[in-house]
Structure formats: structure tokens, C-alpha cells
């Protein structure tokens, strides 16, 4: 249960915010333990919780907004502006009401003596484990501004990469969607009218033409049922891949798709190498760093490999031993990590690996449309060829015999 409080600290300054507790008395005790004297403690109304839930659903927080937030925070911290003032300044100018509310809560928590990383940890639906642990490492090492800058750069890289991939995939998705719609309309409404001539002449026709005629008649009568089945099938597929088992299977299949699978694998390797390098530079132990990276890698196959590597390191072995036994991790990556472990320069090696595969991802993304275009042309050509050979050619043959 959440309580809205107003209290005074030892300096006599008033503080306002939220506190979670089982009861009013427990909330007051928590405030007193944090050096605050309660003035008012009221249970948060359900309407406030509902409003916040609706804001989260309809607004949420995008990666671009997070990137801007951490960029601005890093700039203000570098200018030696106190973190609470920095957060309030950023929150006041945010257009996202939900993000503004979260920033205000974080500022209040810090003002009440809570570390920045712990204040972020209360909002794990927005801030990833990588972000929280990098901020925590910056607090411990006294380099918070550096950690905040890294988080901003990390989110920016992921955002730019996702934008490039989406941009490259928009064209083939658009072409396939238009081809499906046009094909559906042709088979449902135009094909039956064309095949009327063939049926009226009552002449022998090839088997494939008979199939097309039957398909046209069927679609003309039951197009609504076919459309319903297609929409239901797409909906069922989307629902399934959002389940635990479905997502796991989809992520396995994704890595086996030509071109797309290679691109996805390079993205995961880039994400793994860059994030692990940053965490190790931040002074986070290898086992803990591997477990953090496994949570943000974005693929269950790679997550399992990284968790196994963490278990190997925990028992005194090396992570490269696991990578060498897996086909998902390229041999060159495993060998480079092995060299880094042997020479004590693992962080630098991982940074180089991440930089190399990031360039590979950018090159593949730029050429993705070029690589997919031949496949689209072949698919569209097959569709047109089926209609020409199955319908138009028999019509010309019949017309030539008359």
C-alpha cells in the first residue's frame, strides 16, 4: 500500500513524496528511520493509482525519451548542478506526464536520502538492470557523471540501431503487404469474372487452371471466412510469441532465418560485448556483470549461453570455455575473449569485439533492402507467373482454336 506523506527533516525543511508500507503506522516508522518527522501521512487514492496506470499504458517511456533524459542529466551533473535540482529541472520540461511523475518520485526519494541507483530500482519497468547497475557503479567509484553518460550513449546506440533496422524492414514489409492485399482482391473478385469465359465454353482445361478456377469460386463465396482465418492466425501468432514458450521458440527460429538471422546474431554479440566491457570497466565483478548482461541481451538463446558462462566463472573456469562449445558464438569471438582472459585485458578485447560487430551490423543494415529485393522480385514473379500460365494462356489457346 502506498502513502502520500509530508514531513520535516532535521534541518526543518519540508519533504513530500510516496512511501510503501503495510499500514499508516508502518509508513510513519519508515519516515522516522530516514530522519523525517511526519506531518501528514495519507493513503494514496485508488484514482491516483488508476491515473498513473493509464498514463503508463497510453504514454509509457520510449527509448528516445530515456536517451534524452540521461543526456540532459549528464550535462547538468557535469555542470555541477545538484542531482535533485537536475532531476526536477528535467522533469519540469518533459512532455511525457508519466515520465515527469517518475522523475519527481526519484527526486523525492533522493531528497529523502535514498541513493540514485536505489531510486531507479523502484521503477524497473522503465530502467533496465544494466542502467541501474552502471549508476550504482558510478556512485561507488565517484564517477556518476561518467556512468550517466555511458547509459545515455548505450540507450542512444540501441535506439539508432533499432531505428535503422525498422527503416530497412519497412520497404519489404510494405511490398509484401501490398502484394497480399492486391492478390487477395484479384483472386476474390477479378479471377472469378475472368474464368467465367473458360467455364462457359466447356472445353478441356489443364489441372492447374481447374485449381485456380475452384480457388476463385471458393474465395468469391467465402472471402469473409478466409479473411477472418488470416486475421485470427496473425493474432494467434502474435499472442503465442508473447508467451514464454512462444518467445523462446521464435527467438530460436529468428537466428536461423537467412540474412535476418545473421543480422540478429551480430546485434546480440555487439550488445553483449559492449555492455560487458562497460560493466567490467565500472568495477562490477565478472559473474555479476555476466548475469546483468544476460538480462538485457534480448534473446533467450544467448541469455542461456551467458548464464552458463557465469556459472563456469563462478566455479573457477573461464567464460570462453562455454563460448567455444556453442555454435551461436563465432569462433573468432571466443578466441579473442580467451586471449583477453589470459592477458588480463578482457574489457579492452570486448570493446574491440563490440566495435567490429557494430560495424558489421551497420553494413548489413544499409544493404538489407538490397539483399531482400531479389527475394521479393522472385516471389512477385511467381505470383504473376501462376496467373499468366494458369488463366491467360488457356484463354489465348481457346481463342486461337475458335
Image (spheres, rainbow, N blue to C red):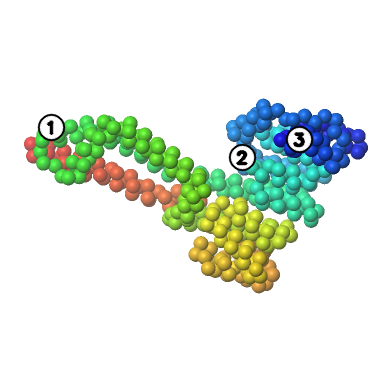
Q: CA distance from mark 1 to mark 3?
A: 83 Å
* SS label for mark 2: loop
Residue that label 3 marks: 23
Q: CA distance from mark 2 to mark 3?
A: 34 Å
Residue 186 percent location from the top left of the image: 29, 35
Category of crowding for the residue at label 2, using alpha-carbon neighbours closer than 10 angstroms: few (below 14), some (14–19), many (at least 20) = few
* SS label for mark 1: helix
Residue at (80% x, 53% y) in the render: 142
Depth check, front residue: 39 or 338: 39
Q: Residue furthest bottom?
A: 342
Residue at (65% x, 48% y) in the render: 128
Q: Give the mark nearest the N terminus, 2 or 3.
A: 3
Q: Give the mark nearest the N terminus, 1 or 2.
A: 2
Task: Identify the mark at residue 200; answer none if there is no mark.
Answer: 1
Depth check, front residue: 26 or 89: 26
Position of residue 169 in the picture relative to residue 6 (left or right): left
Amino acid at each position: 500500500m502506498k502513502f502520500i506523506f509530508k514531513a520535516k527533516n532535521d534541518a526543518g525543511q519540508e519533504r513530500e513524496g510516496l512511501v510503501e508500507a503495510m499500514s499508516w503506522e508502518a509508513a510513519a516508522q519508515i519516515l522516522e528511520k530516514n530522519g523525517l518527522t511526519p506531518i501528514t501521512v495519507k493513503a494514496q487514492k485508488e484514482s491516483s493509482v488508476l491515473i498513473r496506470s493509464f498514463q503508463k499504458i497510453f504514454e509509457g517511456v520510449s527509448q528516445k525519451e530515456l536517451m534524452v533524459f540521461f543526456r540532459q542529466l549528464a550535462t547538468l551533473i557535469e555542470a555541477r548542478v545538484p542531482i535533485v535540482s537536475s532531476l526536477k529541472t528535467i522533469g519540469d520540461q518533459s512532455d511525457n506526464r508519466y515520465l515527469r511523475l517518475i522523475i519527481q518520485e526519484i527526486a523525492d526519494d533522493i531528497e529523502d536520502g535514498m541513493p540514485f541507483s536505489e531510486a531507479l530500482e523502484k521503477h524497473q519497468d522503465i530502467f533496465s538492470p544494466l542502467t541501474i547497475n552502471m549508476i550504482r557503479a558510478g556512485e561507488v567509484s565517484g564517477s556518476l557523471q561518467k556512468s550517466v553518460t555511458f547509459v545515455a550513449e548505450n540507450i542512444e546506440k540501441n535506439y539508432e540501431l533499432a531505428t535503422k533496422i525498422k527503416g530497412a524492414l519497412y520497404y519489404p514489409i510494405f511490398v509484401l503487404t501490398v502484394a497480399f492485399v492486391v492478390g487477395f482482391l484479384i483472386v476474390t473478385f477479378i479471377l472469378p469474372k475472368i474464368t467465367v469465359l473458360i467455364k462457359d465454353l466447356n472445353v478441356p482445361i489443364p489441372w492447374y487452371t481447374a485449381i485456380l478456377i475452384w480457388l476463385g469460386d471458393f474465395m468469391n463465396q467465402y472471402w469473409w471466412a478466409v479473411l477472418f482465418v488470416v486475421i485470427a492466425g496473425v493474432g494467434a501468432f502474435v499472442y503465442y510469441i508473447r508467451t514464454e514458450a512462444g518467445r523462446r521458440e521464435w527467438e530460436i527460429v529468428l537466428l536461423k532465418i537467412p540474412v535476418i538471422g545473421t543480422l540478429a546474431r551480430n546485434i546480440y554479440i555487439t550488445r553483449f560485448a559492449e555492455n560487458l566491457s562497460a560493466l567490467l570497466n565500472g568495477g562490477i565483478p565478472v559473474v555479476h556483470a555476466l548475469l546483468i548482461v544476460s538480462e538485457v541481451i534480448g534473446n533467450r538463446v544467448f541469455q542461456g549461453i551467458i548464464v552458463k558462462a557465469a556459472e563456469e566463472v563462478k566455479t573457477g573456469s573461464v567464460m570462453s570455455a562455454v563460448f567455444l562449445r556453442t555454435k551461436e558464438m563465432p569462433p573468432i569471438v571466443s578466441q579473442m575473449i580467451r586471449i583477453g582472459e589470459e592477458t588480463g585485458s578482457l574489457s579492452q578485447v570486448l570493446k574491440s569485439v563490440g566495435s567490429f560487430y557494430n560495424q558489421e551490423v551497420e553494413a548489413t543494415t544499409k544493404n538489407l533492402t538490397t539483399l531482400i529485393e531479389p527475394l521479393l522480385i522472385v516471389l512477385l514473379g511467381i505470383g504473376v507467373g501462376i496467373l499468366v500460365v494458369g488463366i491467360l494462356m488457356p484463354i489465348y489457346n481457346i481463342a486461337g482454336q475458335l
